[in-house]
């Protein structure tokens, strides 16, 4: 179905708005996927806070102009779906990687984060990045460790004194 100029402008504006606020983007070739499989992928993406859209490559190039994902423009060829991470940098990579495990017809072509184009093999590293909450908990545990060590060290001095006095008491009682 052909799109008129107004529909094309609306699509470009929508994708540009999403791309402007996204952390990372994945472009994957979906050739051979059934409608049911695409629906399952869209559901998984929606549940993970990932914007997933099939867009004509010429419209995607226009939408990505002036965003961090402009570096992907040259590689936009063939039937591609675009996945943008909106909540954390690794969410789109996790969704695409998990879906591609059970479906070899979804092939990652482009991966971009922070204005840099990565190789398709880097999706693994991007997918294993911690979420915001996981990163905060890791930071808190690292910040808590020195204080915990100090408290344990300071508590050891009176504890050792008590054990020494108890040992002397037991020795005199015997």
Image (tube, rainbow, N blue to C red):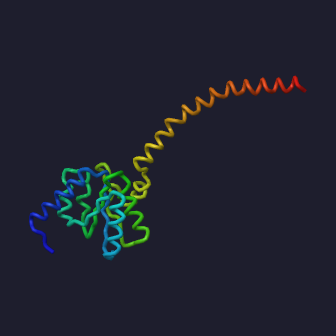
* Residue 2 appears in view: yes
For the point 17% across and 59% down, the residue is 12
**In the displayed structure, would residue 137 be above or below residue 102?**
above
Q: Pick the quarter of the image with the C terminus.
A: top right
User: Quadrant of the rendered structure where residue 4 is?
Assistant: bottom left
Quick one: which residue is furthest to the left in this view? 5
For the point 30% across and 60% down, the residue is 83
Q: Pick the quarter of the image with the N terminus.
A: bottom left
For the point 24% across and 54% down, the residue is 19
* Residue 114 picture location, percent across and down: 31, 48
**In the displayed structure, would residue 150 be above or below residue 51?**
above
**Does residue 36 appear left or right of residue 78 in this picture?**
right
* Residue 161 picture location, percent across and down: 73, 24
Quick one: which residue is furthest to the front in this view? 173
* Residue 32 appears in view: no
* Residue 55 picture location, percent across and down: 22, 65
Q: How many marks?
A: 0
Quick one: which residue is furthest to the right in this view? 174
């Amino acid at each position: 179905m052909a799109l008129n100029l107004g529909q094309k402008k609306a699509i470009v504006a929508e994708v540009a708005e999403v791309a402007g606020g996204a952390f990372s983007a994945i472009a994957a070739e979906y050739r051979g996927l059934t409608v049911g499989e695409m629906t399952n992928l869209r559901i998984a993406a929606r549940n993970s806070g990932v914007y997933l859209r099939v867009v004509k490559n010429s419209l995607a190039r226009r939408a990505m102009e002036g965003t961090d994902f402009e570096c992907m423009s040259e590689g936009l060829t063939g039937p591609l779906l675009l996945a943008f991470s909106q909540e954390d940098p690794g969410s789109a990579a996790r969704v695409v990687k998990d879906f591609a495990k059970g479906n070899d017809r979804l092939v990652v072509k482009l991966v971009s984060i922070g204005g840099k184009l990565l190789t398709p093999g880097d999706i693994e590293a991007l997918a294993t990045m911690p979420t915001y909450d996981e990163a905060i908990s890791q930071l808190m545990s690292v910040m808590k460790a020195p204080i915990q060590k100090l408290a344990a060290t300071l508590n050891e001095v009176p504890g050792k004194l008590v054990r020494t006095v108890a040992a002397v008491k037991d020795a005199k009682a015997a």
